Amino acid sequence: MVILIGNQKGGAGKSTLCLLLAYYLSVIKKRKVTVLDMDYQASISGKFEKAKILENDPIYEVIPSDLKYFPALLELLNQNSEEFVLIDLPGKMDDDLLIPIISSAELIICPFNYDEFSVDSTVLFSLVCREINNSSPVVYVPNRIKTTVKYETREEVDKVLSRFGKVSPCISDRIDFQRVGTVHIPASLIPVFMPALEFIYGGFMKKGKSP
């Protein structure tokens, strides 16, 4: 199953959410996972290489890759039908090489924050994805949300995004998110991110389709 994690808004926590999902699928659900790090910052593959230097055994594979190599990589990864392929997309949507990647997605996960700029970017990302691939479900993850966000703001934003897909339970902000790696996840974060990931897995990944 090919799963995109994307949003053109920087700071939405895209790479961190990708790491959490990879950990959840590998360790908790015992599934085979490969992460394609296609973000220009390559933060996931950087953490992966650092973990290997520290002689930690990887719990899933991370492949840093340019967008142009995606078709060849997908051909290879598709040989294992049980595998989850998580793709950390770059933060910009103005590259035609993204078209085959978005087209191949069976699920699109979009982390966002409850601020005006983030919501505008999220809607634009959704419109681009829908134009290229209108058959795969989209799940919006309110990510690293601070307690100061007003309930009315959440309700308004969730209503807008629900026109494109489903909104998951919220992931609250915690200082420990800075310590998330490709091998170790702080135990204190488990109850923080589990409701959102259980929502995504149960509704969209277990059966491989939208409810």
Image (cartoon, rainbow, N blue to C red):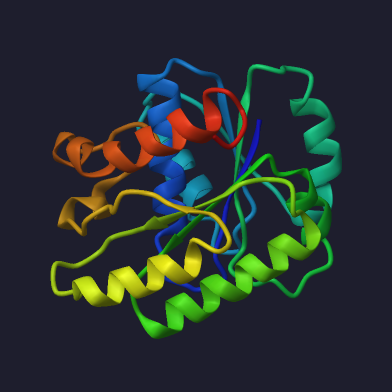
Dividing the picture into quadrants, the one containing residue 33 is: top right
Count of marks, rendered view: 0
Task: Locate residue 79, reporting x and y percent.
Answer: 79, 19
Task: Locate residue 3, reporting x and y percent.
Answer: 61, 41
Q: Residue at the location (67% across, 70% down)?
A: 127
Q: Is residue 64 left or right of residue 142?
A: right
Dividing the picture into quadrants, the one containing residue 181 is: top left
Dividing the picture into quadrants, the one containing residue 195 is: top left
Q: Nearer the viewer, residue 99 or 90?
A: 99
Q: Residue at the location (46% across, 39% down)?
A: 48
Q: Residue at the location (82% across, 47% down)?
A: 69
Q: In this picture, is 181 found above or below 14?
A: above
Q: Is residue 69 left or right of residue 64?
A: right
Q: Is residue 161 left or right of residue 89?
A: left
Task: Locate residue 12, reporting x and y percent.
Answer: 41, 66
Q: In this picture, is 184 found above or below 169?
A: above
Q: Is residue 101 left or right of residue 30?
A: right
**Placement of the C terminus among the 4 image quadrants:** top right
Q: Is residue 111 visible?
A: yes
Q: Is residue 58 visible?
A: no
Task: Locate residue 27, reporting x and y percent.
Answer: 37, 21
**Placement of the N terminus among the 4 image quadrants:** top right
Q: In this picture, is 181 found above or below 33?
A: below
Q: Residue at the location (48% across, 40% down)?
A: 49
